[in-house]
Image (tube, helix red, strand yellow):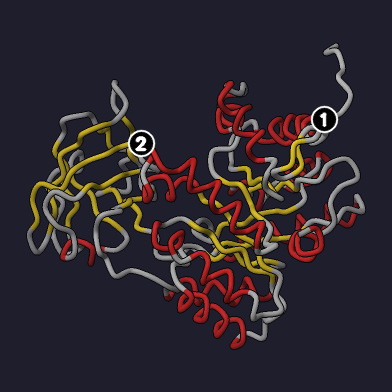
Amino acid sequence: MNKNTKRLLGRKSRVKRVRLMVTMPSEAANNYQMIEDFVVQGMNCARINCAHDTETEWISMVEHIRKAALKHNRFVTIAMDLSGPKIRTVLGSENLKYMTINEGDYIEIIDDSEPILNIEKQLRCSFPDIISKVKLGEHIYFDDGKIEGTITSVDAKKIGINIKRCKINGEKLKTDKGINLPESNLGIAGLTPKDKMDFAVIAKYADIVNFSFVNTTEDLEDLFQLMEFHNANNLGVILKIETKQAYNNLKDILLTTKTKTNAFGVMIARGDLAIEVGWQNIGRVQNEILRMCTAAHTPVIWATQVLENLAKKGIPSRSEMSDINNALKAECIMLNKGPYILEVIQFLNEVLRNEESFQNKNEAMLPELKRLK
């Protein structure tokens, strides 16, 4: 496992085993100092999500990362995400910052050919073909499950949704937030045209490609063909497990990786995955993924909402600290964006240095007891 982790993510630091992957915010394209601070504080891998920003910003981020790593004699890998066929919200007006959604509301997703008559209750989505594929009674989730609804009407141009659950005082739904339909047979899979365009940049600038919404071994073969076309066969590959189908096919997917010479890893993308498999099952599922990947000597990246409260509000919650103890079973922890992300990196590095003396993967360690100062 250590050898495979080093091949994928580079050598570990002197003081901790678990690597840190940090998602680059948009402002990192124009703020070198931000990235240098990330590097100094212990970022091992920089993640650039191609679902956001443009090629110009991505290249600027890469240049800042390489410059800072060289300046401080640090090894920092660069991972770039293919967006994948993720369904996202599109609000009806560019001037509308958000829709306020309340429990009991009725909203509609409408086809691109239809006019929006009520921007407060109607929206579009990035894959309008889903309108013809969903069925009455199926559940729909927005923004990592913050809003839950049931489909109550379907016609050729729109679907109607009754909101069953959201925050008591209403939830703000913005453009570019994810839509999940775990019960629907949508037929959306594999590499999108955007992915194929973006991969040309990834092949040139990245060390690792993060493959979003891989569901089958056929999806994996499509990626290999794309890598061959761009002469990028040496790229590391991180497989983002974020659907029920991907989880059910994980054994076959892992066996397929063993036929290749690339360095591979698996990301437990808990946001989409929790909705897909059900909140009641996500704990068991993430532990099963860890077990399968350990058996396959495949490094695991623990992702989604790690220390999110600290990143966004400046103070961690107790449950987030328990989550970090679980994350010690992985080889890498991924952090998302937030105004306090530098503090998260600093805090997490300190916690990992302390906690790793008690836990190595699934093996408990029993060091000498020490008083807290």
- The local secondary structure at tag 2 comes to loop
Q: In this view of the protein, which residue sits in the foreground, 27 or 185?
A: 185
Label 2 to label 1: alpha-carbon separation:
39 Å
* 328 with respect to 245 (left or right): right
Q: Tell me residue 310's x, y (percent).
A: 61, 27
- The local secondary structure at tag 1 comes to loop
| Residue depicted at x 53% and y 70% | 253
Where is 323 relative to 288, above or below? Answer: above
| Residue depicted at x 14% and y 57% | 135
* 327 with respect to 139 (left or right): right
Q: Tell me residue 74's x, y (percent).
A: 88, 53
Q: Quadrant of the C terminus?
A: top right
Q: Which residue is mark 1?
A: 366
Q: Quadrant of the N terminus?
A: bottom right
| Residue depicted at x 73% and y 36% | 345
**In the image, which disc is placed on residue 146?**
2
N-terminal-most mark, 2 or 1: 2
Where is 321 relative to 254, above or below? Answer: above
Q: Amino acid at mark 2?
A: Lys
Q: Tell me residue 195's x, y (percent).
A: 49, 71
